[in-house]
Amino acid sequence: EVHLVESGGGLVQPGGSLRLSCAASGFSFSDYYMDWVRQPPGKGLEWVGRIRKKADSYTTEYAASVKGRVTISRDDSKNSLYLQMDGLKTEDTAVYYCARSSGGTGDCLDPWGQGTLVIVSS
Amino acid sequence: IQLTQSPSSLSASVGDRVTITCRASQGINSYLAWYQQKPGKAPKLLIYAASTLQSGVPSRFSGSGSGTDFTLTISSLQPEDSATYCCQQLKSYPLTFGGGTKVEIK
């Protein structure tokens, strides 16, 4: 069974840093793109960014709202995805989801992890 | 690319046909996905490539459209379909989501 589990969320002060992790199992992690999506409390979904697979040079894409403050990385040997967040702002408060993606003509996010909550507050 | 969903919410009876629309600010071919999200849960993929039903999703769900106008249809609403539905464009970066449509059962 394909499974994604996020971890690393918590309470952090404005200006602080946090590193989220996403552990993947049940599929060939290295063959897929991976995305991060966030959802502020009571609000809609916001795409955060994507990292492509090795065959596509592990290139990344980011939303304008986080570009320059977050870095997406992966470790295929550990079947793990990461989201390094620096210079956190109160508006970064959200549940953060990781999701598998395929790219290409049938691109979509499936499945999603259960999410990890990040609260940015003093 | 902005995605505008309508309506933002609706209330319908079991057995009703429900239609949700998603309009893109520019053409996205068929690079559109639909997700269902229940409270406190992660989104679940329903439809990709605008009209392809994800494996395991009930056949009462269907998607259509291309270019800028897309539709998600639930042919016969069931109690378990009470959720928020959201579209996503995957044509160009940054990827974007619609604002969501909350479906309630009367």
Image: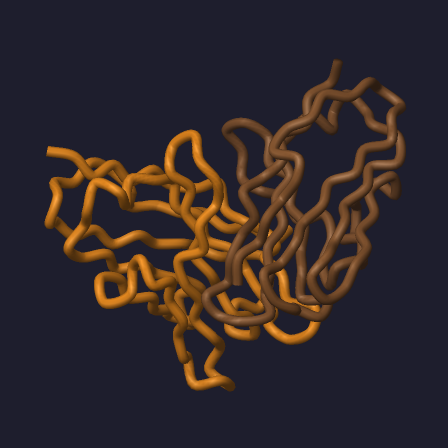
Q: Nearer the viewer, residue B97 or B58?
A: B97
Q: Quadrant of residue B76?
A: top right
Q: From the image, which quarter does the C terminus of chain A lie in? A: top left
Q: Nearer the viewer, residue B89 or A5?
A: B89
Q: The brown chain is which one?
A: B
| Percent position of residue A99, x then y | 51, 55
- Tell me: residue A47, above or below residue A8: below
| Percent position of residue A79, x then y | 44, 64
> In the drawing, does residue A9 fall left or right of residue A99?
left
Residue projecting furthest to the top = B106
> In the drawing, does residue A121 fall left or right of residue A105?
left
| Residue at (59, 48) in percent of width and height | B4
Q: The orange chain is which one?
A: A
- Tell me: residue B17, above or below residue B35: above
| Percent position of residue B100, x then y | 58, 39
Q: Which of B52 and A5 is in front in this view?
A: B52
Q: In which quarter of the image is residue B43?
A: top right
- Tell me: residue B89, above or below residue A89: below
Display colour scheme: by chain
| Residue at (67, 60) in percent of width and height | B32
Q: Nearer the viewer, residue B68 or B86?
A: B68
| Residue at (81, 55) in percent of width and height | B64
- Tell me: residue A118, above or below residue A33: above
> In the drawing, does residue A113 fall left or right of residue B57?
left
| Percent position of residue A111, x then y | 59, 52
Q: How many labels does the image show?
A: 0
Q: In which quarter of the image is residue B60?
A: top right
| Residue at (43, 85) in percent of width and height | A57
